[in-house]
Image: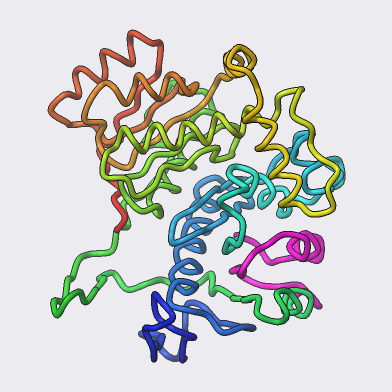
């Protein structure tokens, strides 16, 4: 199909072609995608499909610029989420809860996101999407009437994409760059609980597993902080891993600080305005209040797509509440990393698998 344009509006014409025209992995039911829209839809769908298979329940992701701003499993909505999105936590369905939990990780970055969910979109989720700023959604199906509801968003420009859950991509990937063709086996290393070994509490193992799947589809270098089935902070595409750790940690801190009693959920009409007011109030918190509130963090899992090169990553992850760390290991200073984890009471898991994404 013809695309609106390539990476940038001046890159025209642009096209998308299925390797197997008889069975395309994605079908665009409504809207005209750009090059980046296709990349977002493909990456987001792979993340939620793999995470749902690994964790056994609905998963949602909020993608921006080919990396997730957030990802989450279905679960309870706390008071801040319920008030921000004007939902009843007691009656909200599981699929909607998964997306709210994913978007709430970094709602500022999720403004204008590409949504992915692992199960067919129902009327409840479609109604929520009418009230937030998003560019499109990819899902394995849509209940009756949902496509029409979503197609009306953005004056008819909202993208509605149906993924084929039975599609299996080729085992070999090819990419053309600057007149060169690169070929490699597709990254199909299994990410399962067995990879994490024994002895971890169940919730921590699930969080580490969600983090591993998330970094697999995040531009490297990348790290994530995860808690209760929610990715609270993503650090993507930084040249320095410790900068990823700090960036993602700052986002996780902001998520926690939005729960401070002095930060109102807001009474503005639009979701983005309520979020903006929350973030403004977070900035007004005094240093002592911030420190005291952040001291209550616990049980946060930290995942790195590549080996931690220095112990300073552990130091910064601990400052942001990390109690479990999963990383490939086998760096020159892996012994220092392990010793720093022991010193801080952090459980370290060495997966032996690097998950770079470029």
Location of residue 180 with respect to 339 vertically, above or below: below
Location of residue 351 with respect to 170 vertically, above or below: above
Between residue 346 and residue 86, name the one nearer to us.
Answer: 86
Q: Is residue 119 magenta?
A: yes
Q: Residue at x 58, y 32 (%)?
A: 254
Q: Is residue 258 left or right of residue 177?
A: right
Coloration mode: rainbow
Residue 206 in view of the camera: no
Residue 263 in view of the camera: yes
Extreme residue in the top direction:
343
Q: Residue at x 64, y 15 (%)?
A: 289
The C terminus: image quadrant:
bottom left
Q: How many marks?
A: 0
Q: Residue at x 78, y 48 (%)?
A: 85
Q: Is residue 33 left or right of residue 224?
A: right
Q: Position of residue 315 (x, y in %)?
A: 35, 19
Q: Is residue 258 left or right of residue 299?
A: right
Q: Quadrant of residue 324?
A: top left
Between residue 9 and residue 134, name the one nearer to us.
Answer: 9
Between residue 162 and residue 280, name the one nearer to us.
Answer: 280
Q: Position of residue 264 (x, y in %)?
A: 79, 32
Q: Position of residue 52 (x, y in %)?
A: 55, 52
Q: Position of residue 329 (x, y in %)?
A: 23, 31
Q: Residue at x 13, y 76 (%)?
A: 180
Which residues make up the magenta segment? 117-146
């Amino acid at each position: 199909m013809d695309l609106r344009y390539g990476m940038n509006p001046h890159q025209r014409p642009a096209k998308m072609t299925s390797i197997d025209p008889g069975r395309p992995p994605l079908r665009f039911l409504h809207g005209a995608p750009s090059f980046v829209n296709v990349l977002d839809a493909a990456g987001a769908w792979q993340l939620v499909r793999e995470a749902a298979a690994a964790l056994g329940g609905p998963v949602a992701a909020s993608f921006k610029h080919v990396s997730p701003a957030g990802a989450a499993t279905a679960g309870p909505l706390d008071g801040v989420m319920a008030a921000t999105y004007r939902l009843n936590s007691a009656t909200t369905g599981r699929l909607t809860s998964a997306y709210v939990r994913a978007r709430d990780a970094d709602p500022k970055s999720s403004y204008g996101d590409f949504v992915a969910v692992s199960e067919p979109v129902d009327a409840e989720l479609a109604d929520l999407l009418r009230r937030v700023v998003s560019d499109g959604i990819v899902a394995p199906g849509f209940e009756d009437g949902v496509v029409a509801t979503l197609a009306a968003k953005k004056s008819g420009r909202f993208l509605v994409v149906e993924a084929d859950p039975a599609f299996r991509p080729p085992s070999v990937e090819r990419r053309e760059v600057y007149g060169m063709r690169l070929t490699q086996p597709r990254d199909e290393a299994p990410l399962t609980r067995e990879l994490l070994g024994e002895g971890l509490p169940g919730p921590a193992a699930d969080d580490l597993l969600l983090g591993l799947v998330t970094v697999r589809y995040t531009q490297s270098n990348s790290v994530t902080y995860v808690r209760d089935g929610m990715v609270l902070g993503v650090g993507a595409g930084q040249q320095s891993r410790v900068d990823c750790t700090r960036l993602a940690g700052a986002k996780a801190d902001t998520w926690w600080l939005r729960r401070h009693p002095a930060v109102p959920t807001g009474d503005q009409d639009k979701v983005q305005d309520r979020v903006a007011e929350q973030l403004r109030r977070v900035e007004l918190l005094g240093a002592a209040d911030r420190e005291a509130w952040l001291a209550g963090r616990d049980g946060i899992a930290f995942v790195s797509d590549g080996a931690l090169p220095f112990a300073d990553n552990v130091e910064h992850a601990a400052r942001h509440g990390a109690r479990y760390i999963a990383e490939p290991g086998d760096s020159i200073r892996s012994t220092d990393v392990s010793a720093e984890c022991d010193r801080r009471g952090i459980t370290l898991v060495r997966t032996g698998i690097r998950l770079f994404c470029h």
